[in-house]
Amino acid sequence: MVNNKIKNICCIGAGYVGGPSMAVLAKHCPNIKVNVVDINEERIRLWNCSDLKKLPIYEPNLDEIIGKCRGVNLFFSNNIKECIEQADMIFLSVNTPTKTKGIGAGYASDLKWIEASSRQIAEFARNHTIVVEKSTLPVKTAETIKSILNSSTLIKKNIDLHNINKTFSILSNPEFLAEGSAIKDLENPDRVLIGGEDEESIKKLSKIYENWVESEKIIETNLWSSELSKLVANAFLAQRISSINSISALCEATGANIKEVKKSIGTDRRIGNKFLEAGPGFGGSCFKKDILNLVYLSRFYGLNEVANYWEQIILINSWQQKRISELIIKKLYGTLSEKKLAIFGFSFKANTNDTRESPSISISNHLLDEGARLNIYDPQVSGKQISENLVDKEIDIFMNPLEAAKDVDAIIIMTEWKEFNKLDWDQIFSLMRKPAWIFDTRLCLETDNLRNIGFNIWSVGSNNEN
Ligand code: UDX
Ligand code: ADP
């Protein structure tokens, strides 16, 4: 029986992963003090905001948990040094975007934030500390973290006798939550994966999860299997999306219907019906980054066929976006100059305000390059965030979808927000220039109804006779 002495947890990085995952952990472990720290002062200020509607990330039911735990056993602060000093266990949830320059640019992850936070841990930690990788990381990152932590203890031993017992144990515990359903996924995960070499540390982390997750769902592996599994899980999920999107194009060309094909193949239990929604391609911070990591890793080991195989998923994803943009231009008589179009939905999927790698960005850019002026509306993404993604572009941002529809030639549904079906489409039709087009890239509208109003409709993966 392991004596679980974890009393104090520090999570470095108060983002989409760190914030919700620590909120759920704090909720289920009232005897553990959880400090979530970040270098970003504005982010921490928003996490501490008394108005729970102003939390820095939008995630259904997150506000409720924050309301209950914050100030009780869950704290958000910029005091990184003190929180590291107090911690028995530290989660690393910092960002790891794709490198933009140097070796591996465009493929490998930039580990500078991992390195910086590892150095902070090396400097401030006391006694024995378990360091848990939570960010999605390339395989063998634990080695890097280990090397930074161990080298610093060697130096410290010579100069600081108080820290002579400073030791570290590294675990990989990748997070599988999907944005928009983060709380549901954290409360009831399909599995919890813990990779590591030190049995005692694995058990300590496992015990924490057992406060709300059945022990059968906790999988223990070695460090590298854990790191690789996360990349592979995301690659497999993304692969399904590129597969269905490639077939959506074939449906449009042949007169088959993607919804029918999806149903027909999804009822085969070996295939399953999840992750078969055709659309404008996947976005989000993980899929592209993780596949690029996988491609980089495969090339590094001389497995070029493997690398090319996985890379094709990303190429199909970009192609789908280009294909949709070109099709919109074609339907609008081949030119967008002097035309106003409305983009409905800017987040990369519904129920989140995250816009990282959102297909809305690339499709907006294609349309803007053709001379369109865009009216953009999203129920959760702030105007500031939209502008930051489309700097110096011909865009207007609206808080109200009806105002955004005024005088536009087309509405392009980019995110499957539920509220889009409930809009007053009769009024929207009357506000638009004719012929009034709707391009439903998410198959989320009841199109029969809209056709009756008078709209011209294009939906991804269907025959689209207008
Ligand atoms: C993903 C993984 O699902 C999650 O396990 C991992 O921890 C992080 O990456 P996330 O990016 O938050 O989560 O959202 P997800 O629901 O996977 O959607 C990713 C993208 O794929 C979105 O743009 C979504 O709209 C798109 N998608 C998803 C489709 O186009 N079709 C589908 O059938 C499913
Ligand atoms: P994710 O989706 O992986 O959670 P985010 O970008 O939402 O990614 O969050 C990562 C957070 O990590 C950011 O708020 C960033 O400011 C924070 N961060 C990055 N490096 C450090 C660091 N060295 N110390 C503390 N916080 C950091």
Image (spheres, helix red, strand yellow):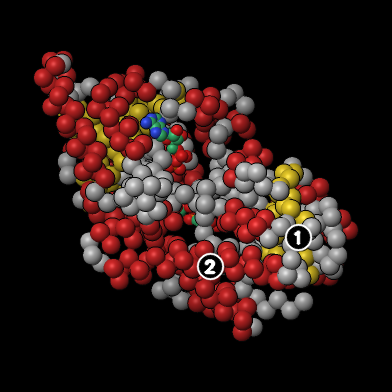
Side of 346 relative to 435 (left or right) = left
Residue picked out by circle 2: 319
Residues at discs 2 and 1 in contact (Cβ within 8 Å) = no
Q: Is residue 52 left or right of residue 191?
A: right
Q: Which mark is residue 32?
A: none
- Up-down relation of residue 44 to residue 339 (above or below): above
Q: Secondary structure at mark 2?
A: helix
Q: Which residue is mark 1?
A: 337
Residue ranking furthest to the right: 430
The one of 211 and 274 positioned closer to us in this rendering? 274
Kind of residue indicated by mark 2: Trp
Say which residue appears at 31% left-offset and 58% top-offset. Answer: 296
| On-image quarter of the C terminus | bottom right
Determine crowd level at label 1: few under 14, some 14-19, many 20+ residues with C-alpha closer than 10 A.
Answer: few
Residue at 38% x, 57% y is 292
Q: Amino acid at mark 1?
A: Ser
Q: Nearer the viewer, residue 304 or 82?
A: 304
Vertical side of 101 occupied by 331: above or below: below
